[in-house]
Image (tube, rainbow, N blue to C red):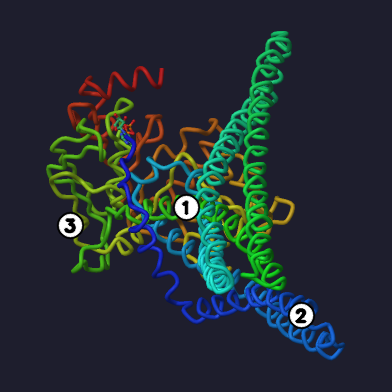
Amino acid sequence: MTREYKKYSNRELIKSFIPYYSRYKWMFFLDMLFAAMTTVSELILPMILSEITDTATSDLAKLTMNFIGKMTFIYLILRIIEMVGFYFMQSVGHIMGARIERDMRMDLFTHIQGQSMEFFSENKVGSLMSRLTSDLMDITEFAHHGPENIFITGIKIIVSFIILILIDIPLTLVIFLIIPFMVFFSRKSRIRMREFQRSQRRFMGELNSDIEDSLLGVNVVQSYGNEKLEGEKFQEKNEIYAKLREKFYYAMADYLTITRAFDALMYIVVILFGGYSLIKGRITAGNFVAFIFYVQTLLTSVRKIVEFADMFSRGISGIERFTELMDIETTIVDKIDAIELKDVKGKIEFHDVTFSYPGFDELVLKNLNLTVNEGESVAIVGPSGAGKTTISKLIPRFYDIDSGKITIDGIDISEVTLESLRDNIGIVQQDVYLFSGNVYENIEYGRPGASKDDIIEAAKHAAAYDFIMDLPAGFDTYVGERGVKLSGGQKQRISIARAFLKNPKILILDEATSALDNKSENIVQKSLNRLSEGRTTITIAHRLSTIKNADKIYVLTDEGITEEGSHKDLLDLKGEYYNLYQVVEK
Ligand code: ADP
């Protein structure tokens, strides 16, 4: 099932984003102030030059060193103001962006972490990661450069307009008439350029995964003598990529040439119409110089607007992806009046439980009734797909049931806090997840902050102590990413040590030994047996040999629980269990 995301308008997206600025109002205000400071020298330089030119052309005697010195000093002060503004705009602006990014990332991380299993089966970790990193970077670039750009170009265009209109109205109108066309055509060609750039990038991703595929499977390629075939396949894609790049460069040349053409047009207009105004005596030589400079300012501002449109679309799509995720409500949450699950004895009951996975119609469990008494060891067996693992996921409330009730010591698990519920349940699964870090930290994960003695004792209980001491750095041995440096049996014993440390009243063993060879299985099984002493244990097992000693065995099939009793009872029954036993064990 793929989720249909809600469509948001740009307005909604920006609105949802504004609260992130609120903590940094002052920084934002300062950033805008500094941005304004960076515009002064560019806006006043034409006036200074115009003043000098006019003085030179009207009365050369007035053009003294004193006068030039004064003008230079004014310009120097303006440049200093500009540099101070620029320095702080660069630092404060970026820092504000980085802080906003930090806040958003934390919010998103917390939000994702609180999501249910349903969410994680729908969203790939890779795509979530890119949302937490590169997408957010697009947003922060936009978060500060966006307002800065709007502000700076706004000031420049408005001030230029006012000054130009004061100098010569017709000429200004002609120039401002050209600007919309310039924006339109530049934007159009830039969008085209960007599209080619995007498709080029997308294709690069494809090419990369092809290369990876071929190189990882190089053994197969060589053993079948298929180098030529692979080469041809690669050549084809490589060719397409080169073609895409060509298209991109043509589009880029279009964009740059169009921009230049408008530059040329603007200057031609100024020279032609400005020259005419000069002849007619409507403007002075100084005005003419000022005109040229302000037109230059306008041209760079227009280019900035066109570039900003790009940044805007990237930023907005980043915000959209952010909002999409933030708007997914966490489905599994504490009830408002949820109580703490305390002093657990460990009796688990399923009362008429019906369950289907969210988004799927098929009922996995239908009116299931099941009782596991305090301290009892119960095994659930049955054909694959019958719903055994599902049962183990319902007890810690990784999913909510459709109807019926699951209780622990008679208390409905939906009435208690998730934290207190899960605190009382230990799960040992087939796939052990070890975090990158050392052995000690991985065991400590069972009860963060546990004492060293407790951790060592847990390792001993799990029969992990000896092998840990044999590792190069004992408990300090780095387990490598996901524990790749350890064998399956060793990893499993570390996870058992974790469970010992947690010391929960309820234990769920989900095919904990099914991936191990016989020898490791024996060792791990012994640890598991020790772990389950004094706890209510539900074992989900493929290998029936491991559950012979269970107090009670339930046989779960598509029809629900069809048989229950001890190993011996069920063999005597010569039913489903008996058949399974024949298939699996013989
Ligand atoms: P068992 O552990 O007995 O092999 P499961 O509990 O894993 O069976 O699965 C029971 C049924 O639920 C199967 O039909 C399976 O396809 C389906 N199922 C399991 N996990 C999911 C999931 N995350 N989303 C949708 N359907 C699922």
Disc 2 marks which amino acid?
A: Ser
Q: Which mark is residue 156?
A: none
Q: Residue 318 carries which label?
A: 1
Q: For marks 3 and 2, give the one nearer the viewer.
A: 2
- Mark 2 and 1 residues: CB-CB less than 8 Å, in contact? no
Percent across and percent down for residue 48 are 72, 79
Quick one: SS at disc 2? helix
- Rendered position, 228 above or below 248: above
Disc 1 marks which amino acid?
A: Gly
Alpha carbon of mark 2 to alpha carbon of mark 1: how far?
57 Å
Residue at left 34%, top 22%? 581
Q: For marks 2 and 1, give the one nearer the viewer.
A: 2
Residue at left 39%, top 44%? 509
Residue at left 84%, top 91%? 66
Q: Is residue 331 visible?
A: yes
The image quadrant where one finds the N terminus is top left
For marks 2 and 1, the one nearer the N-term is: 2
- Rendered position, 140 above or below 451: above
Q: Residue furthest bottom?
A: 66
Q: Residue 412 carries which label?
A: 3
Task: Identify residue for label 2.
Answer: 58
For marks 3 and 2, the one nearer the N-term is: 2
Disc 3 marks which amino acid?
A: Asp
Quick one: SS at disc 3? strand
How packed mark 1 is, by other alpha carbons closer than 10 Å (few <14, some 14-19, many 20 or more), is: many
How packed mark 2 is, by other alpha carbons closer than 10 Å (few <14, some 14-19, many 20 or more), is: few
For marks 1 and 3, the one nearer the N-term is: 1
Q: Can residue 496 be seen in this view?
A: no
